[in-house]
Image (cartoon, rainbow, N blue to C red):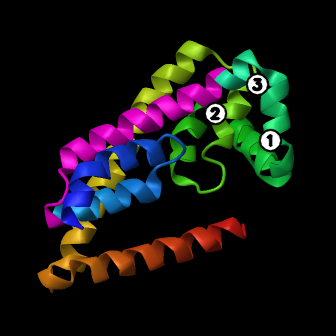
């Protein structure tokens, strides 16, 4: 199992982080504590992928508004929440959206449809992604230390516990 994680872990993290990455970075942080991955490489991979994913969504919406609007049709309440957050928090929504499940991909799409400055979005996205990567990466690494330090031979049971907790939190946020 360790060889599989070492061989494909960063590629899987990159692919997962392109569309969001919160759970992927948490797992990478815990796996970094176990020694299966490197926390700095994991944070770099997740950060770059997350940044590129948001830029892709923003540019997609900017270049093809009809396609972006069509994509967002089925997320009516969440799109409305995204617009309310954009009006209420302005540019800070780029930072906030990194931590809110369910609207993470909608905010860049919604901002791309508006006349929000592309250059401004890039700058805010760089800082927001860096902050997100540092907070989530180091917090998950530290949590891995607490979760897995008691029994090294049962580290994958600890990962299972983390997975169940994250899935439960994700399920609860979907209901919002």
Q: Nearer the viewer, mark 3 or mark 1?
A: 1
18 falls in the magenta region = no
**What is the count of numbered marks?**
3
User: Dot 2 surroundings within 10 Å: few (below 14), some, or many (20 or more)?
Assistant: many
Would you say the magenta stretch is mainly helix, strand or loop? Answer: helix
Q: Are marks 2 and 3 in contact (CB under 8 Å)?
A: no
Name the residue: 58% across, 27% down.
56
- Ranked by sequence position, the earlier of labels 2 and 3 is 2
Instruction: Give how far apart the Cα atoms at labels 3 and 1 are.
Output: 11 Å
For label 3, the residue is 113
Give the magenta range: 34-59
Placement of 151 over or under 37, stated as above or below: below
Instruction: Give how far apart the Cα atoms at labels 2 and 3 are.
Output: 9 Å
The answer to which quarter of the image holds residue 160 is bottom left
Q: What secondary structure is found at the residue carrying circle 2?
A: helix
User: Dot 1 surroundings within 10 Å: few (below 14), some, or many (20 or more)?
Assistant: some
Name the residue: 55% across, 33% down.
54
43 falls in the magenta region = yes
For label 2, the residue is 108
């Amino acid at each position: 199992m360790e060889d599989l994680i070492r061989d494909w872990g960063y590629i899987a993290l990159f692919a997962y982080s392109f569309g969001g990455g919160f759970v992927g970075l948490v797992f990478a942080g815990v796996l970094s504590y176990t020694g299966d991955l490197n926390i700095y490489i994991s944070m770099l991979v997740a950060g770059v992928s997350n940044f590129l994913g948001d830029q892709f969504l923003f540019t997609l919406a900017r270049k093809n508004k009809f396609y972006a609007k069509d994509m967002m049709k089925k997320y009516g309440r969440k799109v409305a929440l995204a617009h309310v957050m954009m009006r209420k928090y302005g540019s800070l929504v780029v930072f906030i959206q990194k931590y809110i499940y369910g609207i993470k991909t909608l905010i860049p799409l919604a901002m791309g449809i508006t006349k929000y400055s592309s250059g401004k979005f890039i700058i805010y996205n760089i800082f927001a992604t860096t902050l997100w990567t540092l907070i989530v990466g180091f917090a998950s690494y530290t949590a891995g230390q607490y979760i897995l330090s008691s029994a090294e031979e049962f580290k994958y049971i600890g990962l299972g516990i983390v997975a169940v907790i994250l899935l439960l939190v994700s399920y609860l946020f979907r209901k919002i």
